[in-house]
Amino acid sequence: MSLEKLNPWMALVTNLGVLLGVIVLLVELTQNTQALRNQTEYANVSQWISLSQSTAMSPDLADLTIRGNAGLENLSEPEVVRYFSYLTAYVLVAEVSYDSILNGTTGYDAEANERFMLYLLNPPGARAYWEVSKVRFSERFVTYVDQLLAGRDS
């Protein structure tokens, strides 16, 4: 067989090899994306668990949360600082979850995140915290939370 007759076959084999390479690359990309989502979800869940366990394991923190939620007037100045730090940890994790939902790096349910934010920031003490502390968070997240709270109030 002459070289001229082999050229079309060689081109076909080369093109099939390129096509196969692209398919393998797409499969790898899909698997890597799913692995990233799984890692993000695991990290977020680990943070939620850690925060929840700290409340469950510490009667003082549980008491602080109950009194702080009822209103900041129920707390001393040092307790307000502790209460605000505690809420900040929760809200930071919620912000990371919100960003992950928007970026598509997690399969988290956006409605579940909304319900949690309403639950967390509904008590009077937590609302007072949010009003003075929201400057710590991204503008996009603040707008999101403010709209949630406004919808809850109406």
Image (tube, helix red, strand yellow):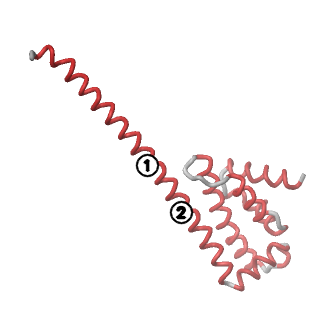
Question: Residues at badges 2 and 1 in contact (C-beta under 8 Å)?
Answer: no
- Neighbor class of circle 2 (other Cα within 10 Å; few <14, some 14-19, many 20+) is few
- Picture coordinates of residue 87, whole percent (x, y): 70, 68
Q: Residue at x 37, y 40 (%)?
A: 25
* Residue 3 against residue 111 in the figure, above or below: above
Along the line of sight, the residue nearer the viewer: 26 or 8 = 8
Tell me which corner region of the image, top left, top right, bottom left or bottom right, holds residue 70.
Answer: bottom right
Q: Which mark is residue 110?
A: none
Q: CA distance from mark 2 to mark 1?
A: 16 Å
Q: Which mark is residue 42?
A: 2
- Picture coordinates of residue 36, whole percent (x, y): 48, 53
Along the line of sight, the residue nearer the viewer: 62 or 127 = 62
Q: Residue at x 15, y 19 (%)?
A: 6
Tell which tag, 2 or 1, sits nearer the viewer. Answer: 1
Tell me which corner region of the image, top left, top right, bottom left or bottom right, holds residue 69.
Answer: bottom right
Along the line of sight, the residue nearer the viewer: 10 or 97 = 10
* Disc 1 element: helix
* Residue 139 against residue 45 in the figure, above or below: above
Position of 31 with respect to 143 (left or right) is left
The residue that disc 1 covers is 31
Q: List the single residue furthest toward the front.
A: 1
- Picture coordinates of residue 33, whole percent (x, y): 47, 48
Position of 18 with respect to 96 (left or right) is left
Q: Residue at x 46, y 54 (%)?
A: 35
* Disc 2 element: helix
Count of numbered badges drawn on the protein: 2
